[in-house]
Image (spheres, rainbow, N blue to C red):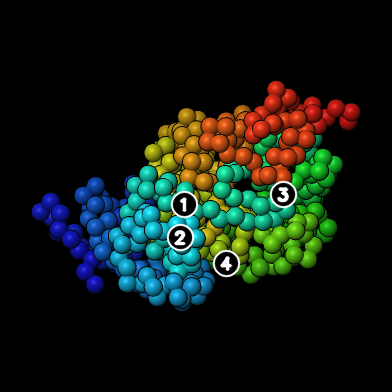
Amino acid sequence: MDLGTTLGGRRFTFRSIKEVLAKANEEKSGDKLAGVAAESVLERIAAKEVLSRLSVRDLRENPVVPYEEDEVTRMNQDSLDAAVYERVKGWSMAQLREYILSFEAGEEELRRLGKGLTAEVVAGVCKLMSNLDLIYAANKIRIPATCNTTIGLRGHFSTRLQPNHSTDNVEGITASVFEGLSYGCGDALFGLNPVNDTVASLTEVLKRFDEIKNRFEIPTQICVLGHITTQIEAVKRGAPCDMIFQSIAGSEKGNRAFGFTSDTVREAKALLKEKGTAKGPNVLYFETGQGSELSSEAHYGADQVTMEARCYAFAREFSPFMVNTVVGFIGPEYLYDSRQVIRAGLEDHFMGKLSGIPMGCDACYTNHMMADQNDVDNLSMLLASCGVNYLIGVPTSDDVMLNYQTNAYHDAATIREILGLRPITEFEKWLEKMGIMENGKLTPRAGDPTIFTAGR
């Protein structure tokens, strides 16, 4: 296999497909930290040229983590649609890119195609695309999923209402929920990141979410994003729960660093089918983010885009309701500035969709990186334009518990109005009943949380 090329009078030779994938990646501070990045723009172009000649089969047969050592690799390899793979295994990565971007490849064909591609192939074709390519290709695909309601249908754009509180005070959380609802936020999920990862604390918040959902007859889903094992125990003890959450990685070693295995996820899914409060069938929520494997020394010398694609291969096995990349949360060690964050958000969204995942995003940044709220606005609009299932919403864009910045509760309404998108249909009807929305736009009553507190 020829892994070399000549550019500008220089000969570039790469030792492995893993190295080609890493050096073909767009510039990421995390790849530099890992020591796998291209040393120059010219070397990056050379790696892209070599990658473009490699076949689908070449990348499938050379996973970045060996089959014998890693359950994520085994799950990905063993679940491929054999007929689809046989049809495309001889295609070069350049041919695959051209096909994905062609008029010939519509939504159903791309959803079918993704079933025959390993994570390394998905990451490889992503590296050959411009930002506009990623937007155009992702816009072709919709991946719906159903818990209590259905997310991801064309023409709709949803939000996760994130009412985080610095002490998990239930009354403070409730006030934040009411504020978010008053702006039309929360059709995908009420989802809290807890300070206290205890069964008692998770149960208290879940009971309040369930009480609000039932009292006001809100068609949505509820979840508290504690550790998967804490949530399992809470449900076993009777806590109301529509979905169970877990952050995931692109290797078995990375998942073990998070404190779980695939068997833990299977246990959670089976438990929710028995004791959960949702109709289903999609009852799991996963979060990802480029760089997490490097932070736990579980990246096996691979670049962070390829490891991120492997997260989606793992998630696909469990048919989740929601997946999102928390794209700028880890910090500048992995994504240095807004340019890298925006690129990563578009990469992750495309790769998730091509992998068959109902994909959302937390378009966010931390205060110690080179980004600001305008960059969040830019990424949010780009993602909504290419059909992202949902974004996150917090009060005034500032999460007081996680200490990072993301979308504000009222941002979703602006994006919906600009792009002609709507909330999940049942949720929109509920907003109309409450007087918060009319004909797809917020009413003068919107933004007033006393709608929910009058007479309490």
The residue lying furthest to the right in this view is 455
Alpha-carbon distance for marks 1 and 4? 23 Å
In the image, residue 376 sits, relative to residue 275, either above or below, namely above
Left or right placement of residue 310 versus residue 315 in this view: left
Q: Is residue 118 left or right of residue 21?
A: right
- Residue 36 location (% of width, % of height): 33, 56
Residue at x 59% of width, y 44% of height: 156
Secondary structure type for disc 1: loop
**Which of the two marks, 3 or 1, is nearer to us in this view?**
1
Disc marking residue 221: 3
Q: How many dots with numbers?
A: 4
**Whether label 3 touches label 1, CB < 8 Å:** no
Dot 3 or dot 4: first in sequence order is 3
Residue receiving disc 4: 317
* Image position, residue 418 (x, y; %): 53, 32
Label 3 neighbourhood size at 10 Å, few (<14), some (14-19), many (20+)?
A: many
Residue displayed at 71% across by 59% down: 280
Structural crowding at the residue carrying mark 1, measured as other residues with C-alpha within 10 Å and reported as few (<14), some (14–19) or many (≥20): many
Disc 3 from disc 1: Cα separation: 27 Å
Horizontal and vertical percent position of residue 254: 52, 61
Q: Which residue is mark 2?
A: 110
**Number of the label disc, if any, that sits on residue 454:** none
Q: Nearer the viewer, residue 57 or 165?
A: 57
| The N terminus: image quadrant | bottom left
User: Residue 321, how many percent across, how many down?
Assistant: 63, 56
Which residue type does callout 2 highlight? Leu
Q: Are marks 2 and 1 in contact (CB under 8 Å)?
A: yes
Per the image, label 2 sits on a secondary structure element best described as helix
Say which residue label 1 marks. 140
Helix, strand or loop for disc 4: loop
